[in-house]
Image (cartoon, rainbow, N blue to C red):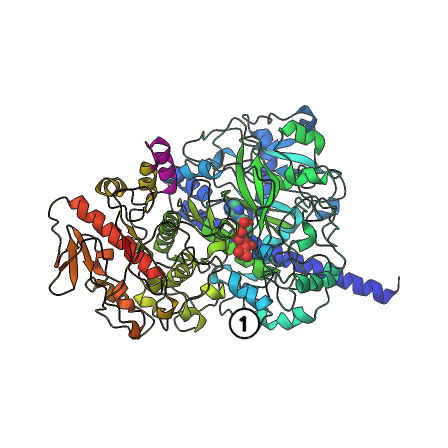
Amino acid sequence: MPSWWRKSSSKEVKKKKGNRESFIDTIATIHRKLKSSSEEKCNGRSGGSRRRCIDTVSEMGSLSRVLSPVPSSQVSRCPSFAEKPHAQPLPLPRVQLSNIERTNSGISVVSKPESDRESNQLFYLPLPGPGCVSSREDHTYAEGDLATASISSDSSIDSDDPSDSRLLSPMGSDYENGNRTNINSPSCVIQKDPFPTVYQKNSKDTLKAGHLLCNNQVLSTSPKWKPSSTHMQNIQIPFHGTLSSAPDSSMSSPSRSPMRVFSVEQVRNSSFWAAKTYPDIASTHCSSPGSGQNSGHNSVGGDMSGQLFWQHIRCSPECSPIPSPRMTSPGPNSRIQSGAATPLHPRSGGPAAESPTSRPDDVKQKSHRLPLPPITITKTCPFSPSYSATTTPTVPRSSNRVEHPTSPGSQWKKGRLLGRGTFGHVYLGFNSESGEMCAMKEVTLFADDAKSKESAQQLGQEIALLSRLRHPNIVQYYGSETVDDKLYIYLEYVSGGSIYKLLQEYGQFGEVATRSYTQQILSGLAYLHTKNTVHRDIKGANILVDPNGRVKLADFGMAKHITGQSCPLSFNGSPYWMAPEVIKNSNGCNLAVDIWSLGCTEGKSFIRLCLQRNPLHRPTAAQLLEHPFVRNVAPLERTISSAEHSKGPAAMRSQAFGHGKNHLKLDSEGMGMHQSRGSKNCFRIKVSLLDAYSPKNVSCPISPIGSPLLHSRSPQHVTLIPIRSSTPLTSSSIPFQHLKQPTTYSLAGIGMTQRSQNCGFHTNGNMPYHEPKPDLSQGFPQGSYVFRDIFFPDKCVLGNQVGHSVPGDPRKLFDVQSVLADCVSQQLLRDHIKLNIHGL
Ligand SMILES: Nc1ncnc2c1ncn2[C@@H]1O[C@H](COP(=O)(O)OP(=O)(O)OP(=O)(O)O)[C@@H](O)[C@H]1O
């Protein structure tokens, strides 16, 4: 070999190694900071606070331990197992035990230096230690864990990849699917704060931590929920071959989706990416063996020519005219290449395997196999490279489950691919010991990527934020760990997939679902905002649904904790959901940006409330929870449960009405305005959409999930005609203050003939309404759609009276208000509505 070549190669190796270390340093620094923060809290406490501190540390997620800045200490703790009299071997088959060493450290996996990787190594599988026991006392919302951990029998891949079902032009697809901005596209925007402050670390510390991490190769987090067993050990399992524990895709790098808005630096480098040659890609087929899955976000198969070819023939919604140089996902042909061997990434160091429990010669089984007992798995693939990745100390614990698992050796095994995101793939994780499931977000950390560090920062930010959140409408964070060059984030498994996917597969939602989802999203947002955290990427693809209809906000990669009134100006998120102030860089980011995004994502009923250009005019999430569209919405799961015990279809319809408190009353009163079928005592209200009177100057961003109510097929027909507006429409926005204006909507019913004195009210018994007097020449009078009763349910309108008192049965009027509110909500969904009531 020529000397110049050797020199060059040496430099290259050093460079790559340096990049790798630098990248891992970033992760390490993030984890160290989290740990440091936790330790500071701990040190500031004493006595009885100690336990609480431990809990806090545990609850903060494994991140603080995984990426401890002092990994050496963690490592040193591993052998201490011998000193622990309570240390007991795991109930694993003998064939395993011979190769397993245990420690009592709560620290997870530690592997040998890279130089030893080709030999049979011992590395520690993460098992929680006694000191990591979490009381989980404040796990208020843990009840949802089991509900969401249902097993999906669908062997196919659940992908939310918008590219799956669309043949769109790059721009068009981007627009319709709302994917994040393509850094290479003309519409790309600039992120002003590419590096969150919290992750701007001291370089020395970073280097130190990173070095240790590199030496150890594998570090894992402490579990968010740690088993309370007193026999927590780590296991050392001989390692054969590569440590690529989840080498499903050799191209899984933490690169971003082309549709995501990123930093200035990224944008600047876009030309670099566009012009760059991609030896890694060219030399590597991007396939996801066994995935059988829809194409990934930014996936194109194989080398660059393959990418271009695919884009030409398919134009994935996330495809950019300029293919992303950092394609992280298997190509679209991965579906038909299911089971095909995955070529190695030049640095993957070993053969890829889709599943850690898979045999290399049984690819199909890799992606579709059922969870097998540990002994079976072990015999099949006792120490496969990917086996380590599926082991984690992280054990989700719900309040209604045993806190002391019989076996402390809970191990996550990577299962089928659930979806692909910007940073990597998400797999189903199964704990064959406990039977639990989780979602494993896997990110390959290739340090030769100039942007990997930033990717790590973003992931670290997501981890840091998620670890502090606990709410039934937010995907629960379980923990994270770094295994070799892969980062795993363990999350609550939400088996229903995203709203986006559900809409794609099943079409529009009914009103009950829409209202329920909206209400739950708002609940999650309200909680999030109380934490001064803004999600910044609310959209259908990031809202998951469990089998019981419970909604979970997910993907906090763009989330940010803000201090003060607003966070530093940044441009993150998905353009078509972005609030105007974000786009205009006028006010930076604030909590209100999520409200705007919500208006773009759910139904249309909130659109005029949410999509107000002035963020100060937007109602808060808490205020929107009082909107009749979501107020009193019964949880879907409760509705289903109640329906099972109902006496007949009428009761079920009543249940399905959505007003948990009122639907029975409505039914008995014959006021089931949303029931147009079968209820003799009901009247129907029909809605017609007149495009000719569509509102003017109304910002109406296209949602990738569409509007469930725009093309309603629901038999529920509601018609309202706005007759007047106390606030003449002068702009596209409706100041929130105007919501306090008197009600000026209309609802005509049978026999409603009594006209009010000053508002054009008509009454029919207890049924208030307004005479429809649409000023069509003015367009849609938006102001008339916002009325006090929506937000002030205690102030009822009866006849021409506005007050708190409710003559007769208060529930009746409340029902009426609910009905009216529903109608107005419907009214908000349409550009123009025509009254057409049919009495029965
Ligand atoms: N907790 C979960 N349960 C079930 N499926 C999940 C879960 N988290 C993610 N997924 C699936 O994986 C896909 C990608 O996940 P996610 O969006 O979090 O990744 P990402 O890298 O942050 O993507 P992006 O930032 O581009 O939206 C989701 O669309 C969903 O299909």
Residue 46 lies in quadrant? top left
Reading the image, the residue beneath label 1 is 187
Q: Start and end of the magenta stretch?
A: 634-649
Question: 176 left or right of 793?
Answer: right
State the residue in front, 807 or 439: 807
Which secondary structure class fits the magenta region best? helix
Q: Position of residue 712 (x, y in %)?
A: 41, 55
- Does residue 36 appear in the picture of this structure? no
Q: Is residue 643 magenta?
A: yes
- In the current view of this chain or complex, which residue is farthest to the right? 1
Label 1, residues with CA under 10 Å away: few <14, some 14-19, many ≥20: some
Tell me which residue sits at (46%, 61%) in the image.
703
Type of residue at label 1? Answer: Ser
User: Considering depth in this image, is 81 or 432 the residue closer to the camera?
Assistant: 432
Horizontal side of 222 relative to 619 (left or right) equals: right
Q: Residue at x 61, y 33 (%)?
A: 371
**Image side of residue 302 versus residue 698, left or right:** right
| Residue 159 seen in this snapshot | yes
For the residue pair 48 and 240, the one nearer the viewer reads as 240
Where disc 1 sits, the SS reads: loop
Could you tell me which residue is drawn at 47 percent across and 65 percent down?
576
Residue 650 on the magenta segment:
no
Q: Residue 474 in the image: state x and y as whole percent.
A: 43, 48
Depicted 161 relative to depicted 49: above or below: below
